[in-house]
Image: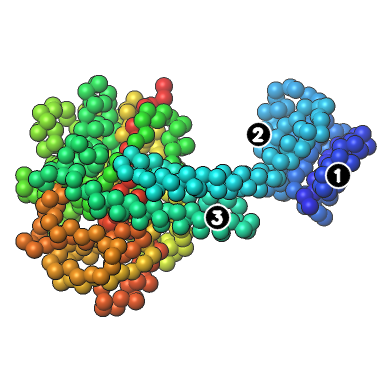
Amino acid sequence: MKRILWVDDEIDLLEPYIIYLTSKEYEVATASNGEDALDSMESSMPDIVFLDENMPGMTGLETLQEIKRLYPEVPVVMITKSEEEHIMEQAIGEKIADYLIKPVNPSQILMCLKKHIHQQKIVSEQTQQNYRQEWSDIAYMIDTATTAEEWMAIERTLSKWDVELSGLEPGQGHSGMHSLIADQRTQANAAFAKWIAKNYESWFANGQKQASGPVMSPDVMKHAVFPLLDKGEKVLLCVIDNFRYDQWKTIQPLLSEFFTVREEEQYLSILPTATQYARNAIFSGLTPLQIQQMYPQYWVEEGDEESKNQYEKELVQTLLDRYRRRETFHYWKVNESDFCERVIAQLKGVQPPLNIVVLNFIDMLSHSRTESKMMRELASDEAAYRSLTLSWFKHSPTYTLLRRAAELGFTLVLTTDHGTTRVKNAVQIIADKNTNTNIRYKVGKALNFSSKNIMAIDQPKRVGLPCPNVSSSYAFCTGSDFFAYPNQFNYYAQYYRDTFQHGGISLEEMIIPLVTLTPKK
């Protein structure tokens, strides 16, 4: 039973309200002044306080200040005869939950109670009901999807429900609902992997990405950035490594303070969904094979020790040169917060039409979560991972950078090179010592595996992938699987289980945000 404390110097006149609330199964305690109210709260904590603003002795506002000082978590609804603006502003400044003008009617009181002490329960019940009603529609979408646009709609829908269901108040028997959405995502990823295996090669010809296929990594600059430059707009292209669609939806409300979403799209990352391949493809407008053939000085092989993305600026220039574009550009790669602050300082000066910033925080977060027990606890599941992303963004120089970009009139293109997925099941693979170390994909000679859930590409050049050796092939994990070698299989299976990884085939890794935002005036 929820407990109400009603504080009013004319409390006897409120007997009809008390009888009404008691009939609705609320426990109602009363006090005729501020001192008695504080004594009552010390002995028995209410779920909500209704507080009269105009009382002799300790006023309603003074009582409110004491309640908020001692019990800041208790919602207080101010009730007053006065409609003076300064009183209302003072009460709001003291963080009241609501404000009612006398005379109030029982339905107003009941609405306040539903809003402030029953809201979570009501929202949870409605959310569950809405998902149950939509579950069969989502299942049908999964069973019948045949185009990239349909799979993008599925990822948007599943991400929406991932976010909404993860926000349900714990302890109310929601584990079954969480399992239901998890099972549906598993089914979607299994069907998506089959669709990729069936269609992926058709999007390429002679190692080149074909315009007839869906928008993919080599198309991003031509599809989203060049048209803005053609209109004479100043563009800031922000590439956040390892940035999933659900993470974009998590930070979107913060960006809406100073940007308007002009167009929210998604595109498909190329395989492997790894920085070396996908981000180099974005900046060059080429497949990895084309980069290796046309600009061998800018392609770093899997087995090389040097950084796989050290030539991104040079690749952007090759793209502009091939399309005979005369725009100058600035390029920054941000790994530390103080460098982000230097970028902000540089944006204040005269800027070229195109400005590119690469942010690696999410990538560092996913890697540190794998390696650090503390980070695993902080980001224990997808909901916690999203929450940590939001906390980082809200308090990071990145947020300041994008706000400053809006003030300076930049059109923002926000995207990523690939997403990540939470892996759970280790599958065995046998390979030679020169095979790469990524646990979601392998490239090497004589790859040997038995799992039916692995997608193999035996002729990599057909899909725009280089071959380190003549007999090299690629193998990609699907769903939530990851590779482990027979030697110490159980150790690595346990070490990597429930970590966020990339490189393979899943909705979370391949279907990623591409958003154009216009600064608010």
* Crowd band around label 3 with a 10 angstrom C-alpha radius: few (<14), some (14–19), many (20+): some
Residue for badge 1: 23
What amino acid is found at the position of numbered circle 2 in the picture? Gly
In primary-sequence order, the first of circles 1 and 3 is: 1
Q: Is mark 1 on a helix, strand or loop?
A: helix
Q: Position of residue 121 (x, y in %)?
A: 66, 48
* Res 60 visible: no
* Res 93 label: 2
Q: Nearer the viewer, mark 3 or mark 2?
A: 3
Q: Residue 141 carries which label?
A: none
* Vertical side of 103 occupied by 151: above or below: below
Q: Residues within 10 Å of mark 1 (few under 14, many from 20)?
A: few
What is the quadrant of the C terminus in the image? top left
**Residue hosting label 3:** 177
Residue in the picture at 61% in, 44% down: 126
Q: In which quarter of the image is residue 470?
A: bottom left
Q: As drawn, is 33 to the left or to the right of 409? A: right
Q: Residues within 10 Å of mark 2 (few under 14, many from 20)?
A: few
For the residues marked 1 and 2, what is the alpha-carbon distance in whole angstroms?
34 Å
